[in-house]
Amino acid sequence: MQKESSKVTYVPAPPPGILKKPELYALSIGQVIGAGVITLVGPAMALTGYSAWLAYGAAIIWGFLMIMPVVWVTSTLRLGGGYYSMLAGLANEKAAGMYAVAFLWQTMSISLFGVSLGVYANSLWPQLNPRIVGIVFLTLFYVINLGGVDIMAKAQKIMTWTLIAVLLMFIFVGMTKLETPVLQISSPDFIRHGGKGFIAAIALFVYSTNGYSLTMNYGRDAHNAKRDIPWAILMSVPTLVILYCGVAIVAGGILPLEIVENQPLTLVARTALSPILFVVFMVGGPIMALMTTMNSSLAYNCVPIAQACTDGWLPKSLAKKNKRGSYYRILTIVYLIGLIPLLLNFSVTTITNNIMLINSSLSFLYAFAYYQLPKRYPEAWKKSRLHMPDKLYYVMVTVSVIAYTCVFVNSCLTLTPLITIANLIIIGGCFAFGFIRSKSPYVHIESSVWDD
């Protein structure tokens, strides 16, 4: 157990929660699989040719390397507020404060799922207004999350199993109709633009490969957090290899490369599937992927914000729960933040650009916390199910930092100078807030990191 300080009070761990392995796995998979699996394969094939499926596999490994220390942190400690609690417990209160305010900007990503969901629904049923569809589904999952974590998790399981089944259906049917040399490494179109194009395809894919790390936010609600959360994270990796690589093989294996490059997966799906199965694919594939991500995002966004409110970074009154155990005030704020871009008709690109660099920047705060684990909680670290020699652990964290740095540099290179400067100003403001607010007498950390 870590010692108390003038700014930190130890709070006993809450009783075990209700989320077990099936629920955590569903939340993990539902969070990571979004519309990227449908929209990114075509652009990736334009970059690297038929080897897009291999690039996806490499991106999954890269994505895991980025978040790999999370597995060891969550096998050692139970975190009540996800990344926020990790920073408060392993780094310091200033880092936690920086994250608390920066995280509010990330909640805008929920609108991205609403916008994308509306676009896909409109492509299937043109009479539907994409913006209205996004608003309706965002409101639906807001209501579901008001019902508490048990209702949210039950809905997530149903949607995630449906998503996995539909993607497997697409893979199995498509594999029987392969016509192109998508698996022939010797083909001149396998890596058509050399190593540079292959690496560019990996960078394109990597953003859609590691969202499962956010499963760490459910430490308070997990039945056996230090066992089941690492398990759910690790099981997500082979699941993604099967689904992502399988989908990419089919995407490049049915129609000629010049037809499918830069095109969404729906083009191949129309060719490979019967009209009925195509509708099933559209509803159970891209639309369901966005629904699972939207549902879990509303849930996990509330967790660190609630802990930040409890600790005094934000108004404590916001962390009040309803009778179902939902942080209804925070949930409402997150819902409204996600609703504003939909009402203002922001594009997917505008939303993505405004959160990409902030997300990458926070990774350096995470890295600082990862390095502290063996020193801050030595006894818990020794008892961890996944304990390894300290030197090996530090090597693993360093690999994670390198992987994150590559993503950060790529983010800077792909954004316009204006957006980059705006993001850096926001990040600087968040850091300043952490330093200034940490001196306030209203900030007092109630430990949400438990090693027992």
Image (cartoon, rainbow, N blue to C red):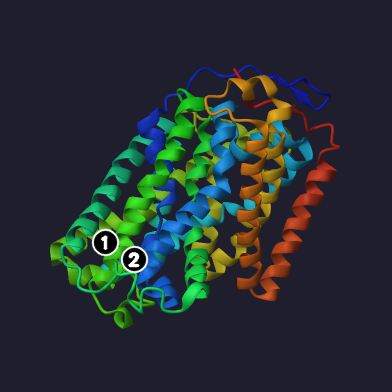
The answer to which quarter of the image holds residue 38 is bottom left
Q: In this view of the protein, can residue 347 be seen by the observer? A: no
The answer to which quarter of the image holds residue 273 is bottom left
Crowding at label 2, few (<14), some or many (≥20) Cα neighbours within 10 Å?
Answer: many
Distance in Å between CA atoms under marks 2 and 1: 8 Å
Instruction: Please tell me which residue is depicted at 42% across the width and 35% down the height of the picture.
Output: 24
Residue where numbered disc 1 is placed? 282
Disc 2 on helix, strand or loop? helix
Label 2 vs 1, first from the N-terminus? 2
Instruction: Please tell me which residue is depicted at 66% across the width and 44% down the height of the picture.
Output: 366
Name the quadrant of the N terminus. Answer: top right
Instruction: Please tell me which residue is depicted at 69% across the width and 29% down the height of the picture.
Output: 374
Name the quadrant of the C terminus. Answer: top right
In this rendering, the answer to whether 292 lies above or below 252 is: above
Query: Position of 443 compared to 228: left or right?
Result: right
Please tell me the numbered disc located at residue 120: 2
Q: Amino acid at mark 2?
A: Tyr
Query: Position of 133 compared to 7: left or right?
Result: left
